[in-house]
Image (tube, grey):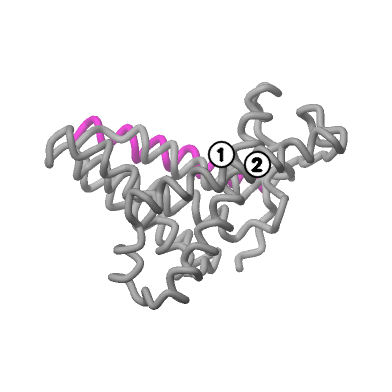
Amino acid sequence: MLKLSLPLRLQLSLVIVVGAALLKYHAWSSLCVYGAIALLWVALLRVPIRRMGGLLGTELIFLSLLALPLGWERASFLLVRSLVCLITMNSFLLTLPPHSFGIALKSLPVPAPLKENLLLTGQYMEILLSEVTRMQRSAQLRGLNGTTGWLRYASAAMIGALYLRTLDRAERVYAAMITRGYNGQLPIDSTLRTKERLAILVAWAIAACLTLTSYRI
């Protein structure tokens, strides 16, 4: 795995996601560039491909239900753009040490209430990843091996069960955090070094140029 600090990895991931999310519709050439950057990010972080594939499959089912009613042409661009964003953020989350999302979050210049919401979202994502892994293992024990078997298992009932299980675990985790004195802030400092700030500025400049170019094509 590429040796980057957690705040730097988070902010570089956000640069890719924000840049791709702000692309003009049907700017396929710029989106392809972001897709190549996302795949490079996967390679640099050495993301476990099987876990990535299982998580993306579950997420794309939700996105397909939302995007397909918009029409095939518009939905195709939205799905590919969402795929690029999901690959980038999942790469960060899947290579994140356990319970360290809050450390990376401390470096973001955002209001404290928003940080708290993001922290709880990060905790929920960790729970979601854990539950997806458990359900995949359960499907394999029932003989649903391979991609086709996993897609059969990813039915509406499975998605509902996944939501209920993760919601129940998230409530228990939050109750445990409150019991241990959590008040919305973590007693941890996470600052970026000068070289890391320069790297982020360069990344934002490249992303801004690439995204703005999509509106001129």
Q: In this view, does 37 lie to the left or right of 5?
A: left
Seen at 72% across and 37% down, the residue is: 174
x and y, in percent, of residue 201 in the image:
56, 39
Q: Image point 42% across, 40% down: which residue?
A: 207
Q: What element carries label 1?
A: helix
Predominant SS along the magenta part: helix
Identify the residue at image location x=35%, y=67%.
Answer: 150
Using a 10 Å C-alpha cutoff, classify the residue at mark 2 as few (fewer than 14 neighbours), some (14 to 19) or many (20 or more): some
| Residue positioned 47% across, 38% down in the render | 205
Q: What element carries label 2?
A: helix
Q: In which quarter of the image is the C terminus?
A: top left
**Image quarter in which the N terminus is found:** bottom right
In the figure, is residue 42 to the left or right of 67?
A: right
Residue 204 drawn in magenta: yes
Report the span colored magenta: 196-217
Measured from the top left, where is residue 175 in percent x and y?
Answer: 75, 36
Residue 94: say if magenta.
no
Above or below, comparing residue 168 to residue 87 in the picture: above
Amino acid bearing label 1:
Leu
Label 1: few (<14), some (14–19) or many (≥20) C-alpha neighbours in 10 Å:
some
Q: Residue 64 carries which label?
A: none
141 to 74, vertically: above or below = below
* Residue linked to disc 1: 201
Disc 1/disc 2 C-alpha distance (Å): 6 Å
- The residue lying toward the viewer, choosing from 66 and 144, is 144
Closest to the observer, 165 or 104 = 165
The answer to whether the residue labelled 1 contacts the one labelled 2, judged by CB atoms less than 8 Å apart, is yes
Task: State the residue position of label 2.
Answer: 197
Image vertical order of residue 22 relative to residue 59, above or below: above
